[in-house]
Image (cartoon, grey):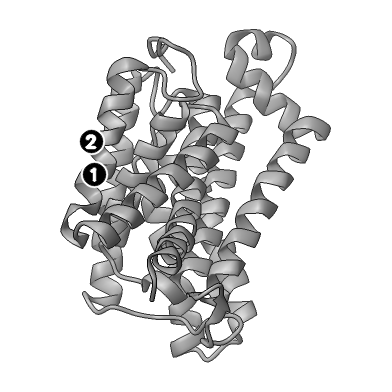
């Protein structure tokens, strides 16, 4: 393979993994906008989506489509229950307390999955087969096209949701000013619940569509959560478009460093670039120059 084809291969791989990071970062941003919380269990929603789909497809022999749909619904319900019993039930907690709760939830989700399914690695079949598509000397797996398609669909659907629906506009109002939203009659607690449900829904979708490529494992969500958080920060917390751009940037950096240097450096290179950007622009590439201080929930 010549250099041009190699670079194209690294680019295609980087876009695929960057799309996954973007979906995780979007989940972070939805909850952050509505509550100011950094939900460190977001990566575990992705893991739960993949593991649940594997169970229904491989153990209960459901169709791939039905397994994916059921998995997304279950993860969405888990997100709602998590918010109702772990977040909403707290009385005037600080943001730091809520962040610690999300970390505890992440540990609980990971431990529960390990107890139920063990430490084995699981896989789902690809949606459109495993025959690679050749492009100018490089190859791309059909599942990668599904991932890109779902990212575009999620971004488009969210744009329409927040612009044209009553619930979407209410969630945006809560993101701008929760107190003012409450004064005009918006039920802020319900909007917070919707934000967790929507975030878990997107996480569940991400888990189902990436499992054929990345495999499913009880500990997969931790690293995804860290990468997704880094992506959200790099793009500017709360900025949906920035999350997509930053996800692609980090994915490409990882792919190029793994291909041109060593796979052992891919995480370090991406994080070093992230730290450098945040040193000079704390609000991220596409966010405000200064990050606003977090307020009490």
Q: Position of residue 92 (x, y in %)?
A: 40, 17
Q: Position of residue 52 (x, y in %)?
A: 45, 72
Which residue is located at x 45 percent, y 58 percent? 11
* The C terminus, quarter of image: top left
Identify the residue at the far bottom of this view.
61
In this rendering, position of residue 176 left or right of residue 101: right
Which residue is located at x 30 percent, y 49 percent? 106
Q: 181 or 214, which is in the foreground?
A: 214
Distance, label 2 to label 1, CA atoms, is 5 Å
Q: 72 or 249, which is in the foreground?
A: 249
- 2 and 1 marks in contact (CB < 8 Å): yes
Q: Which mark is residue 269?
A: 1
Quarter holding residue 221? bottom left
Q: Secondary structure at mark 1?
A: helix
Q: Is residue 174 above or below residue 58?
A: above
Q: Position of residue 104 (x, y in %)?
A: 26, 43
Q: Which mark is residue 192?
A: none
Q: Position of residue 29 (x, y in %)?
A: 50, 33
Q: Secondary structure at mark 2?
A: helix
């Amino acid at each position: 393979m010549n250099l041009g084809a190699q670079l194209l291969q690294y680019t295609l791989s980087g876009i695929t993994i960057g799309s996954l990071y973007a979906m995780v970062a979007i989940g972070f941003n939805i909850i952050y906008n509505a509550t100011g919380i950094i939900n460190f269990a977001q990566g575990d929603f992705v893991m739960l989506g993949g593991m649940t789909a594997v169970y229904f497809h491989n153990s209960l022999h459901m169709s791939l489509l039905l397994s994916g749909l059921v998995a997304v619904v279950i993860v969405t319900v888990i997100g709602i229950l998590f918010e109702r019993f772990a977040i909403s039930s707290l009385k005037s907690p600080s943001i730091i307390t809520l962040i610690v709760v999300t970390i505890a939830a992440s540990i609980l989700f990971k431990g529960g999955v390990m107890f139920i399914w063990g430490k084995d690695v699981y896989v789902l079949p690809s949606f459109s087969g495993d025959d690679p598509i050749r492009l100018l000397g490089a190859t791309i797996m059909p599942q990668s096209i599904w991932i890109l398609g779902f990212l575009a669909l999620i971004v488009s659907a969210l744009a329409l949701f927040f612009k044209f629906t009553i619930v979407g506009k209410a969630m945006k109002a809560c993101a701008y000013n929760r107190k003012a939203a409450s004064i005009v009659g918006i039920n802020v607690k319900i909007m917070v619940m919707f934000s967790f449900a929507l975030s878990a829904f997107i996480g569940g979708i991400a888990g189902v569509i990436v499992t054929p490529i990345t495999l499913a494992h009880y500990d997969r969500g931790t690293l995804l959560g860290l990468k997704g958080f880094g992506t959200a920060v790099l793009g500017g917390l709360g900025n949906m478009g920035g999350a997509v751009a930053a996800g692609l940037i980090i994915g490409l950096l990882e792919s190029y460093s793994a291909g041109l240097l060593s796979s052992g450096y891919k995480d370090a290179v991406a994080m070093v670039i992230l730290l450098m950007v945040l040193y000079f622009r704390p609000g991220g590439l596409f966010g405000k120059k200064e990050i606003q201080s977090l307020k009490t929930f």
